[in-house]
Amino acid sequence: MNILDKIVLRKKEEVAACKAQTSTADLEKKAAFSRETYSLKDFLTHPERTGIIAEFKRKSPSKGIINNQVTVEEVTMGYNQAGASALSVLTDRDFFMGHDDDLMAARAVNNIPILRKDFMVDEYQIIEAKAIGADIILLIAACLTKEELTAFAKLAKSLGLSTLLEVHSQEELDFSLNPFIDVVGVNNRNLKDFTVSIDTSLQLAQTIPSEFLKISESAIDSPETIKILKKAGFNGFLIGENFMKTANPGKAMQDFVHQL
Ligand SMILES: O=C(O)c1ccccc1NCC(=O)[C@H](O)[C@H](O)COP(=O)(O)O
């Protein structure tokens, strides 16, 4: 079984356990559920923001521990000050050492959009995302059917959340677009075998319909790569490891941005 299938299998068990503990009616009573959300599209195109979606990621299946010596507050505030258009916070525990508490902590100290970076397999998680203070959900085409992608994005829209659709191939792009999607992300990492190539973004750039903003995700490790991706038409760039592997990820992003 590949890693993505393992993650999805475990996620379905986790969600079933959460549902047994906390109802959606209880989630809807949380204070964050009623807050006004920030729009990913607005912040990606804001002239004073960089287009970078900066990720808080302690660990990953491909790299193991990246950094577990920093706090979510210091890192996300550093990213915000360095001009992030949005924050991405991993909430998956078993494979990424994330937690819902990390997102809530980031929410408490930041006023820019936050992506709940997790593997969405059930509508319950979308309601939960709103209840913990997220503004954006991620839908990974490789894990979902066309019907699920439409239903999940439609629910997100009805809650005021932005949807980032993630694809890795032309085939995924062809079946997964729907009118409720806000932004299309091309993941340069093959989540089944961990190989990475920026060419994935460059190849798909032209075939993403122009009504969608587009972002490139993963393995972005230099300002030169951003310049190439911008030329290819990308509006946003999801970066995790390149910043998180340093002792001060916020400062690393600031230095990176100065070279753009
Ligand atoms: O990063 C992994 O190893 C991974 C493995 C399996 C599923 C998802 C995975 N990563 C999620 C991501 O796409 C990245 O965290 C994100 O795009 C940032 O990538 P990077 O800048 O390379 O840390």
Image: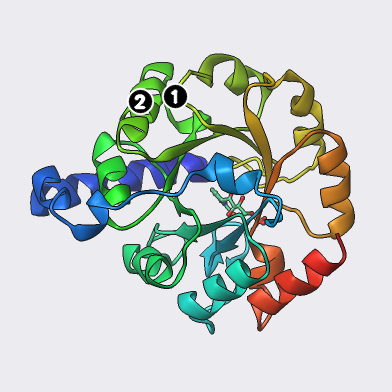
Residue type, numbered disc 2: Lys
Depth check, front residue: 205 or 8: 205
At a point 74% along the width and 46% down the height, the residue shown is: 196
Instruction: Give the distance between the C-alpha atoms of the residues marked 2 and 1, in whole angstroms.
Output: 5 Å
Task: Determine contact: label 2, label 1, CB under 8 Å.
Answer: yes
Residue bearing mark 2: 154
Q: Which mark is residue 180?
A: 1
Depth check, front residue: 204 or 80: 80
Q: Secondary structure at mark 2?
A: helix
Is 147 placed above or below 162 here?
Answer: above
Q: Position of residue 52 (x, y in %)?
A: 67, 54
**Residue 226 vs residue 177: left or right?**
right
At a point 63% along the width and 60% down the height, the residue shown is: 84
Q: Residues within 10 Å of mark 2 (few under 14, many from 20)?
A: some
Q: Residues within 10 Å of mark 1 (few under 14, many from 20)?
A: many
Chain-order first, disc 2 or disc 1:
2
At a point 45% along the width and 32% down the height, the residue shown is: 143
Is 250 placed above or below 158 here?
Answer: below
The furthest residue to the front: 47
User: Quadrant of the rendered structure where residue 136 is?
Assistant: top left
Q: Which mark is residue 145?
A: none
Q: Position of residue 156 (x, y in %)?
A: 35, 35
Residue type, numbered disc 1: Phe
Q: Secondary structure at mark 1?
A: loop
Question: Looking at the figure, which quarter contains the C terminus?
Answer: bottom right
Q: Position of residue 256 (x, y in %)?
A: 80, 67
Scheme of colours in the image = rainbow
